[in-house]
Image: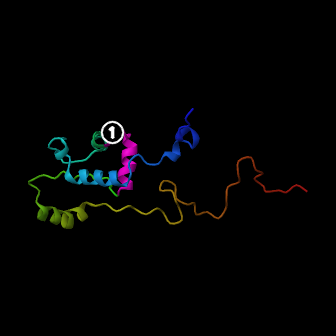
Amino acid sequence: MVSRPWRREGLADLGPRLDASRLCRLADALDEGPAVHGFGEDQRWTLARVSDLIARMFHTRYTLRGTGYLLHRMGWSVQVPRHRAVERDEAAIATWWREVWPAGKRYRRSATPGSASRTRPVRRCAHRRPAPGADPGGSRVG
């Protein structure tokens, strides 16, 4: 009977499914963009699209989490595109941030000195209340 490596050495010892040359081919394919690989007009790589591309190119499947780990090892990071209106006026926005925003900004009121609670400030009396069930006279036994 032929002994398989995953039986002899365990699953962790099989190594990566994509070697260095395949990772270079994948990086080149990702640099070409999604439209070149038939993913429509949207120019964003999603984990599902990258996983499908890996399956098409190398006939091996990765889970979405595994694809994310692979991309991270390759130096890719999560990118979230900014959706901005075409009519956006940067000068008006900068003016608003500089002039209007500080006027409407409320500053937090500091707590009463010596108190962490805003609802019950520190009591300023010299005598402490006895604990519940304690002898109010403070007499000692003995």
Q: Which residues are magenta?
A: 58-74
Query: 3 or 134, which lies in front?
Result: 3
Does the image show residue 32? yes
Residue at the left extreme, as displayed: 87
Q: Residue at x 25, y 51 (%)?
A: 30
Residue 104: which quarter of the image?
A: bottom left
Q: Is residue 81 above or below residue 109?
A: above
Q: Residue at x 53, y 38 (%)?
A: 4
Which residue in the protein does label 1 denote? 59
Q: Position of residue 61 (x, y in %)?
A: 36, 38
Q: Is residue 122 above or below residue 58?
A: below
Q: Position of residue 76 (x, y in %)?
A: 32, 55
Q: Residue at x 61, y 63 (%)?
A: 125
Q: Position of residue 60 (x, y in %)?
A: 36, 39
Q: Position of residue 11 (x, y in %)?
A: 52, 42
- Left or right: residue 78 versus residue 37 is right
Secondary structure of the residue carrying tag 1 is loop
Magenta span includes 71: yes
